[in-house]
């Protein structure tokens, strides 16, 4: 019984991290918003997130989503895998099927713009 209770407590605390972080719209950088709602409907929300050079996105979580790069740059990304520099090209898309969390910083010399489409 004690073993089952311990496992349950560990599962709850491991899931708690994303729940206590802001979502992409709530998260900003140095008190300023970086994402805006382009469309919100019953089934989905579409965000446009803009990152000039030296602007990032505080640690936040994403629900499963689809993303598209309108304008690329180079980012420093910190997530559960560590910190790395990643060039992100214009026109790149990605999707996540599970909850994820990260913090990013535009270390490039151009403004990056992303669309994030989240099913509700």
Image (cartoon, rainbow, N blue to C red):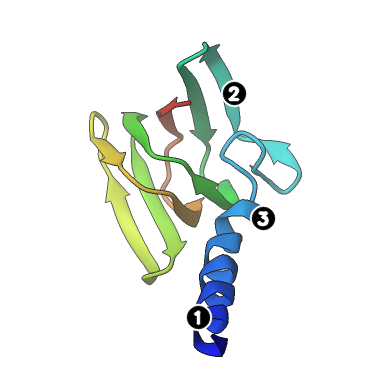
Secondary structure found at label 1 = helix
- 69 relative to 59 in the view: left or right: left
Secondary structure found at label 3 = helix
Query: Are the residues at dot 3 and dot 1 in contact (C-beta closer than 8 Å)?
Result: no
- Residue underneath mark 1: 4
Task: Give the residue at x 50% y 79%.
Answer: 7
Task: Give the residue at x 72% y 49%.
Answer: 30
Q: Nearer the viewer, residue 9 or 58?
A: 9
Marks 1 and 2, how far apart at CA: 43 Å
Residue 107 can be seen in this image: yes
Q: Residue furthest front?
A: 1
Instruction: Work out which quarter of the rendered image holds the N terminus and state it.
Output: bottom right
Locate residue 75, reporting x and y percent: 40, 52
Residue 54 can be seen in this image: no
- Residue underneath mark 3: 20
Q: Quadrant of residue 6?
A: bottom right
Task: Give the residue at x 57% y 79%.
Answer: 5
Locate residue 56, reporting x and y percent: 56, 48
Marks 3 and 1, how far apart at CA: 25 Å
Give the number of the disc on residue 36: 2
Does residue 73 sit above or below 93 in this rendering?
below
Marks 2 and 3, how far apart at CA: 21 Å
């Amino acid at each position: 019984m004690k073993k089952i209770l311990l496992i349950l407590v560990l599962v709850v605390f491991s899931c708690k991290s994303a729940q206590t972080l802001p979502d992409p719209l709530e998260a900003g950088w140095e008190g300023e918003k970086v994402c805006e709602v382009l469309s919100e409907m019953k089934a989905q929300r579409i965000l446009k997130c803009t990152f000039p050079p030296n602007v990032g996105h505080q640690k936040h979580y994403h629900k499963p989503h689809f993303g598209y790069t309108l304008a690329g740059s180079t980012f420093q990304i910190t997530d559960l895998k560590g910190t790395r520099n990643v060039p992100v090209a214009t026109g790149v898309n990605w999707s996540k099927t599970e909850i994820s969390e990260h913090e990013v910083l535009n270390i490039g010399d151009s403004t990056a713009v992303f669309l994030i489409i989240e099913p509700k």
